Amino acid sequence: MADIYELQLALHLPGSAPPEDLALLRWHLGLEGGRQGDGYEYPLWEARGAALRIGGALVGELHSSDGAGYALTARQEAHPDEFDDLRRIVPWLGARTTTAGTVGYLRFHEEHLPTC
């Protein structure tokens, strides 16, 4: 059995977010207009469709909020092999978000409550 976790993020970014930051997020989400960079081997949040282990659907969206900024939502299955990359990008997002408080969680697929 694989060690699979549910990663869920929901946050806002300011309208002043630099184009290169938005391009990196688009790449991680598997969206057009993205660019690979910063040493990541593959996009972290490009999976879509039915989740194999965590139930529900896998999503990754970045939308403009009528000039007021950007809304980012991602729900993905994550393996511990990806944790180093997640430890890099989640604080990076945290330093850029305009969302106060919790912006997401990580939950082992067999647990009912998030662990982090």
Image (cartoon, rainbow, N blue to C red):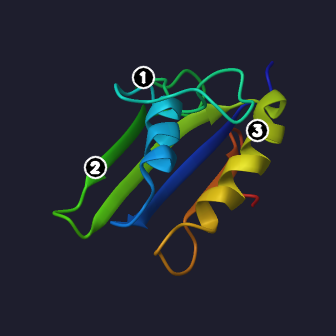
Which residue lies under the disc numbered 3? 85
Does the residue at mark 3 contact the one at mark 1 (Cβ under 8 Å)? no
Helix, strand or loop at disc 2? strand
First-in-chain label (2 vs 1) = 1
First-in-chain label (2 vs 3) = 2
Specify whether residue 112 is in view: no
Residue 94 position in % (x across, y down): 62, 66
Q: Is residue 39 above or below residue 6?
A: above
Specify whether residue 29 is in view: yes
Taking the spot 28% from the left edge, 49% from the top edge, the residue there is 63
The disc at residue 10 is: none
First-in-chain label (3 vs 1) = 1
Q: Which residue ends up furthest to the left in the rendered image? A: 66
Mark 1 Cα shell of 10 Å, populated few (<14), some (14-19), many (≥20):
few
Specify whether 37 is left or right of 86.
Answer: left
Which residue lies under the disc numbered 2? 63
Taking the spot 70% from the left edge, 60% from the top edge, the residue there is 91
Specify whether 106 is left or right of 59.
Answer: right
Residue 77 position in % (x across, y down): 61, 32
Closer to us: mark 3 or mark 1?
3
Closer to us: mark 2 or mark 1?
2
Specify whether 7 is left or right of 88.
Answer: left
